[in-house]
Image: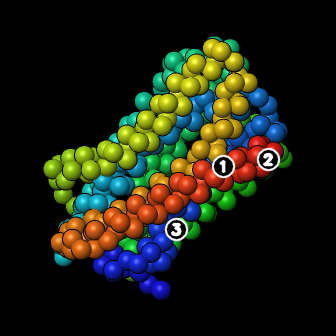
């Protein structure tokens, strides 16, 4: 069943459309979980603590990808809903180009400031500091691709190709998992192997969409020549700021928890808190995925002036989110027991 942004959405049609986005966010969230599994079982507690201490920093920086993706897809979808597809493609290309430029600058700064960042997180033992600096620097080398990967998750939905986004992220996750096993278990590269595996997966996840949208395709979006429209960039930032703040605040809370745990319980406390966060990441992925998958639909109908469908989407979204919250709350005691056994 080919589902279009302009359709009337029943529960079945809406869930079919957003399901790839939910699965996509889960696949993206697997990066830190897979790294944590291999490092905790085959490397040691200190490297595992280094991952859990530094990954929130990398996620905080990567949150600008959520901002550009959600804010940008809203602007692009609204423009398509108004009937101006050519301008929508120009905006799309401009947003991605500006995002990549900003991501490169942030990556250079993060790479240079890796040790001060680690010290600010509360790491005091030299071994832990060394591991944190290593993981952060390798992470910032692939940060532009990681940021683009988050942004394209929303733009694939706006292009009416959420399934392609899922495939790209599954491919990235497979690359990450295979390289984790090869580099850690077989070649014994330790934490460096985990960081390289994660970076490789992020590069795959960011590069596949670039290649797809550069070529002629059957989606609603394709890279075109563009002129800078700073007013549009401003709208993208404002529109997507809520998504960025949500992800940024989560990362900041994790950083603060880690900072206090480092003083109270040391590396073991960081490692234990990291395991708990893995469950939280999976649960949050459901709601984040629904938001990313449904936002372009809302923006399209807003641009088309279809207020009846907007009210329909609002009612169905509230129902889905409330039921999902209750189900996850009820399932969490059972799921966490099985999860803890595997880590």
Q: Please identify, in this view, whether the residue under mark 1 or under mark 3 is nearer the observer.
A: 1
* Label 3 Cα neighbours within 10 Å, binned few <14 / some 14-19 / many ≥20: many
User: In screen coordinates, is 144 left or right of 302?
Assistant: right
Residue at image position (25%, 46%) is 238
Asked which secondary structure carries label 2, the reply is helix
Asked which secondary structure carries label 3, the reply is helix
Q: Quadrant of the C terminus?
A: top right
Q: Please identify, in this view, whether the residue under mark 2 or under mark 1 is nearer the observer.
A: 1
* Label 1 Cα neighbours within 10 Å, binned few <14 / some 14-19 / many ≥20: few
Q: Picture quarter containing residue 73? A: bottom left
Q: Can residue 259 be seen in this view?
A: yes
Q: Name the residue under label 2.
A: 342
Sequence-wise, the earlier of marks 2 and 3 is 3
Measured Cα–Cα span from mark 2 to mark 1: 15 Å
Where is residue 163 drawn, in percent x and y? Answer: 51, 72
Q: Do the residues labelled 2 and 3 touch (CB within 8 Å)?
A: no
User: In the image, is residue 44 above or below residue 287?
Assistant: above
Image disc number at residue 332: 1
Q: Can residue 101 be seen in this view?
A: no
Residue at image position (66%, 49%) is 332
User: In the image, is residue 144 above or below residue 168?
Assistant: above
Image disc number at residue 20: 3
Residue at image position (73%, 55%) is 178
């Amino acid at each position: 069943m080919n589902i279009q942004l302009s359709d009337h959405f029943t529960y079945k049609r809406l869930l079919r459309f957003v399901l790839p986005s939910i699965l996509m966010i889960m696949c993206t969230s697997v990066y830190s979980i897979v790294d944590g599994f291999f490092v905790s079982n085959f490397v040691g507690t200190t490297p595992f603590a280094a991952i859990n201490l530094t990954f929130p920093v990398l996620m905080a920086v990567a949150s600008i990808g959520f901002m550009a993706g959600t804010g940008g897809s809203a602007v692009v979808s609204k423009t398509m809903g108004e009937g101006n597809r050519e301008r929508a493609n120009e905006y799309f290309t401009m947003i991605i180009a500006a995002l990549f430029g900003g991501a490169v600058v942030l990556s250079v700064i993060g790479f240079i400031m890796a040790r001060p960042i680690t010290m600010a997180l509360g790491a005091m033992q030299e071994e832990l500091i060394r591991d944190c600096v290593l993981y952060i620097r390798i992470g910032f080398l692939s940060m532009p691709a990681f940021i683009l990967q988050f942004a394209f998750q929303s733009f694939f939905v706006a292009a009416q190709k959420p399934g392609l986004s899922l495939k790209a992220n599954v491919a990235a996750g497979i690359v990450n998992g295979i390289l984790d096993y090869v580099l850690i278990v077989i070649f014994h590269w330790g934490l460096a192997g985990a960081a390289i595996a994660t970076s490789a997966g992020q590069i795959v996840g960011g590069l596949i969409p670039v290649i797809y949208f550069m070529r002629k395709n059957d989606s609603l979006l394709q890279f075109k020549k563009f002129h800078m429209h700073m007013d549009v960039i401003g709208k993208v930032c404002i529109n997507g700021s809520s998504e960025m703040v949500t992800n940024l605040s989560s990362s900041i809370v994790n950083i603060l928890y880690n900072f206090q745990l480092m003083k109270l319980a040391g590396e073991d406390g960081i490692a234990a808190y990291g395991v708990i966060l893995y469950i939280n990441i999976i649960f949050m992925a459901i709601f984040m995925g629904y938001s990313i998958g449904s936002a372009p639909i809302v923006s399209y109908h807003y641009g088309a002036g279809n207020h009846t469908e907007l009210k329909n989407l609002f009612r169905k979204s509230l129902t889905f989110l409330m039921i999902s919250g209750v189900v996850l709350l009820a399932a969490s005691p059972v799921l966490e027991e099985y999860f803890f056994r595997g880590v």
